[in-house]
Amino acid sequence: MKKIFLCFFFSVFTLITFSQKADQPADNAWESIYRGSSPKINDLVHTRLAVNFDFDKQWMNGEEWVTLQPHFYPTDSLTLDAKGMEIKKIALIKGKSELPLQFSYDSMQLRITLDKTYKRNEKYTIYISYISKPNELKLEGSSAITEAKGLYFINPKGETDVHTEIWTQGETESNSAWFPTIDKPNQKTTQEIYMTVPSKYVTLSNGLLVNQKKNADGTRTDYWKMDLPNSPYLFFMGIGDYVIVKDKYKKMDVNYYVEKEYAPVAKKIFGETPAMIAFYEKITGVPYVWPKYDQIVGREYVSGAMENTTATLHQDGAYQNARQLVDGNAWESVIAHELFHHWFGDLVTTESWSNITLNESFANYSEYLWDEYRHGKDAADDHAYEDMQGYLMSKSDDKALVRFHYKNKEDVFDAVSYNKGGRILNMLRNYVGDSAFFKSLNRYLTLHKFQSAEAQQLRLAFEEVTGQDLNWFWNQWYYGSGQPTLDINYNYDNGKARVIVDQTQATGKIFKLPVAIDVYSEGAHKKRYQVWLENKSDTFYFASDKKPSFINVDADKVLLAIKTDHKSAEEFEQQYKYAPNYLDRREALEYFADNKLSTLSIGLNDKYSGLRLFTLEKLEEASSFHVPSVLSIIERMADKDPDKKVQAKALELLAKLADNKYQPLFEKYINDSSYSVSGAALLGLTNLEPSQAYTLAKKYSNDALGKLGEVVAEIISKNGSEDDFNFLLTQFKNEPFSENKIKSAFTFARYLLKIKNTDNIRKGVDEIMKVRNQVPDQYKEFIDPGFKQAFNMMSNVQMTNGNSELANYIKGLLK
Ligand SMILES: [Zn+2]
């Protein structure tokens, strides 16, 4: 699964959150509960389903034939997860007849008494007739849940303009809301699904579409079959009026299910998939085992994306038009992530949610591997650094990667399992070397294919390949928590260079870290030393005739650590010039920026676009781009930089100067294919002519997404009237869910404060509430204070205007 991590909340809302948290009584009972893997009493063998849908009631009528066998010990009973269903009939299949079975049901689990005691390897098949009612599903008496319904009907009656769809979301244990099963990741089953749908719709499921049959009543039954075992949480159904854009990897079908409007760009969005399959096959040495690979986009999807076996579901953030794609494919990493799960997650599956690192850390790291291969090491390191910051900001120092204690199983899908886990794999790769790393992955995948595994089995595969005992690494990084805080100092005397590294983390725990140190004597000339950090303070001496020009600790820049590196400006200049990695250069630029040094501008000529962008941002923060020598470089970048985002940022800086000499430049780029570039140009023009801002924004509002959309919406919200409501609502609705959309919610809320039409205000508020509800549960405590404040302000305005009903409605949205 790809979660959306919303980092900025931590900075914006930290204060509010801390004061709130203090008021709540502590519920720490979960800390003493060990979450191991689920015991296997019966094993799933095969699951056959026949389903049809009641779009009006949002129900699914289901029939299931599930085949099982005792795992080891004989048993005369079977417990199946079946959430919120109406159970009509349960029977044992005996040849051609059915033998009704006794059962009890508590709306969560079915407890079935079998007709006799079954022994190991003795298979039996149970027939269940049922109705799945996902919208009536209640968990332990709580109110209806939004995030674990399993089966989702989107605009089923066609009452709104949202694309009508049905899709499912299984992870963690929600697929048992649409078919009775043993809903645990350590179970695997082959499957068949017969889906009967109105014939105007296409269907998607796991495995191959074997045949389609037209029915007399205007429906069609599609028969999907998956011959390879996979876990119940990976089962999927998708239904809707999609266009299927066909692609191939060798002879295998690789298809993209998109709404009609996106069919022309589907290959621009998803078209790297075959190359990704080839790449992942090559590095793991394990072929893609599944019979096909499809990807589908779901509206109002509750997560980022999900790796259902051969049928990945993406949220609508995947939808990007041709102009958005000019700025780069924002969804490429997610596509890579879900695909790599088809090795780590779908082929070898975590045995428990506690071991989710075996799925998610690899999927996270696959983003790095793909970036490195396709876009170069700088781009991959940039992505990794952002991920590391995301982890550090999440303040998860007390959470181990393998998590045997958690409150809710959804909690393990966090920045530790994803961001930190990915960095740990990168350190492991650096330590054992590329060849051993990928051989070990191959060993692990080969040994455990079509089975579940735990983190120790990964260690054993690495030990087998490398011949090294790796308990220290696993104990420290997989079963231990936190990360080192390093303080690095240097000095030189009597032909000896000295490096002192202190571990200053507050926990007092000392990390054992293999580290490369490069000692630079002149220019790029360097000598490498491999050392171990393993004490609270470690000192290393290097013989050197003269003072080294600089010393690079963690020369490969792989450590997961918080670091203070006491270098001089001259040493950082040398580091920028001669050390090879992205982070070497970024650290130097950060030092120049923090110390307000003019040397910062060397970053404007960096070979990597991300560092040129970073430098522009730092110059903007410091308002130090007016110097003629710097300005002339920015002017050139605003016209010529090959990267659209860099060019846009340069234009944005020039826009701030409101200097008429840039008018021709802004006019040249106002119609650029990139929304970022045209948005920045529009900002430039409106800054030159504020009285024309509204007219200009209206002029470009017909096709305005991304940065251009933001600029247009901001201007129209500020200067517009009641008449602009529909435009602003649509603009807001069409923005895919992201951190930016949450910011847009507040811009939109400010506009709603100004208008009078109560119907519009209600519509607007409802749309804002929808965005709030899309925020994953674990972040709601961070964003709710902001939303509450906005709603209170709106409610107060309506109260003053005498609309008490609307005022109370708005106030009541977030109690
Ligand atoms: Zn994932």
Image (spheres, rainbow, N blue to C red):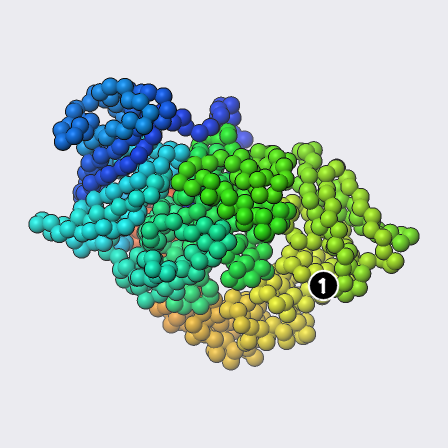
Image-quadrant location for residue 580: bottom right
Which residue does the image show at 40% across and 60% down from the upper left? 274
Picture coordinates of residue 677, whole percent (x, y): 48, 70
Closer to us: 155 or 126:
126
Q: Secondary structure at mark 1?
A: helix
Amino acid type indicated by mark 1:
Tyr
Mark 1, residue position:
578
Q: Is mark 1 within 8 Å of ligand 1?
A: no
Which residue does the image show at 35% across and 68% down from the upper left? 702
In the image: residue 759, left or right of residue 547: left
Closer to us: 629 or 566:
566
Which residue does the image show at 57% across and 40% down from the upper left? 464
- 680 to 168, vertically: above or below: below
Does any portion of residue 537 appear in the rendered image?
A: yes
- 361 to 87, vertically: above or below: below
Does any portion of residue 746 appear in the rendered image?
A: no
- 54 to 106, vertically: above or below: below
Picture coordinates of residue 588, whole percent (x, y): 69, 59
